[in-house]
Image (tube, grey):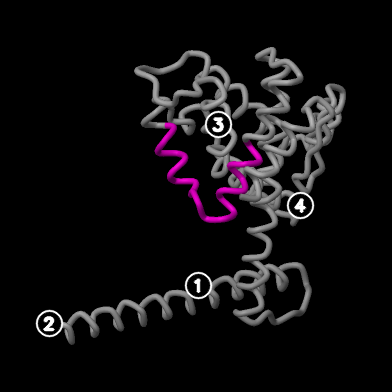
């Protein structure tokens, strides 16, 4: 029985390696064909393309998290009347969750499941169902990847909002307020990315003392030194 399990495990490993190899070849073929269409000569190797693509995905995911965070804070201030202090505390809660994801303490599917179970919220219901256009050009394609990544990573910000509004956690039925907030954030995120105006939202937040860089670093002149120290300890714990 152990030998059969070992053989099955080895077979599955070989299948994964084979699938990964074919994926890299297909990706390299696609890039090379695109270059050829533009009259450019370059022969990308499968491993080169795969490595570059993973780096791009990581970079876009980081940008998506920052974009979602900026829009979330903007929406909570402008449309849901969060005062400066609550806004800055929410920014801290988002930072803690981002840190947890980065340290593998939690995963995005876990946050999404918690939102469904505890908040009775399926945020995808509020995301614009309009298909992302199939466009040409590096900048347009990158924008589309950013939109897709923003949708995927949005449970971080929505979880932070939920536990800010409902510190105890699970609620017995849907919250109209959470639904309205989710709808506003989903719509504003996509519009901001499509119009390239995220920096305008970021600058507006500076008006209430919250400075956020596009690298995700933020500082607040509204939190006391004690609160800032406590938050920092939670982030790096």
Q: Position of residue 153 (x, y in %)?
A: 57, 43
Q: Residues within 10 Å of mark 4 (few under 14, many from 20)?
A: few
Q: Position of residue 147 (x, y in %)?
A: 63, 42
* Closer to viewer: mark 2 or mark 4: 2
Q: Earlier in the sequence, mark 2 or mark 1?
A: 2
**Mark-to-mark CA distance, 2 and 1:** 33 Å
Q: Quadrant of residue 16?
A: bottom left
Magenta-highlighted residues = 94-115
**Residue where numbered disc 1 is placed:** 23
Q: CA distance from mark 1 to mark 3?
A: 33 Å
For the point 74% across and 80% down, the residue is 42
Q: Nearer the viewer, residue 3 or 90?
A: 90
Q: Is residue 223 left or right of residue 69?
A: right
Label 3 residue SS: helix
Identify the residue at image location x=55%, y=25%. 182
Q: Nearer the viewer, residue 197 or 185?
A: 185
Q: Which residue is mark 2?
A: 1
């Amino acid at each position: 029985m152990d030998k059969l399990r070992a053989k099955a495990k080895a077979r599955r490993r070989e299948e994964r390696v084979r699938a990964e190899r074919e994926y890299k070849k297909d990706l390299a073929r696609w890039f090379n064909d695109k270059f050829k269409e533009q009259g450019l000569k370059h022969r990308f190797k499968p491993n080169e393309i795969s490595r570059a693509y993973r780096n791009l995905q990581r970079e876009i995911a980081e940008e998506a998290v920052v974009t979602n965070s900026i829009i979330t804070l903007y929406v909570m201030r402008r449309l849901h009347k969060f005062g400066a202090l609550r806004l800055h505390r929410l920014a801290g809660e988002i930072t803690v969750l981002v840190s947890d994801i980065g340290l593998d303490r939690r995963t995005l599917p876990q946050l999404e499941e918690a939102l469904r179970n505890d908040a009775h919220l399926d945020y995808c219901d509020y995301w614009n169902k309009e298909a992302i256009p199939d466009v040409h050009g590096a900048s347009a394609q990158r924008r589309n990847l950013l939109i897709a990544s923003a949708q995927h990573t949005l449970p971080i910000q929505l979880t932070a909002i939920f536990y800010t509004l409902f510190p105890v956690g699970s609620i017995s039925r849907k919250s109209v307020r959470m639904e309205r907030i989710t709808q506003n954030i989903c719509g504003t995120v996509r519009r901001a990315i499509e119009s390239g105006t995220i920096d305008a939202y970021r600058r507006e937040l500076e008006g209430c003392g919250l400075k956020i860089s596009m690298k995700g670093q933020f500082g607040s002149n509204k939190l006391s030194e004690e609160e800032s120290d406590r938050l920092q300890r939670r982030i790096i714990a």
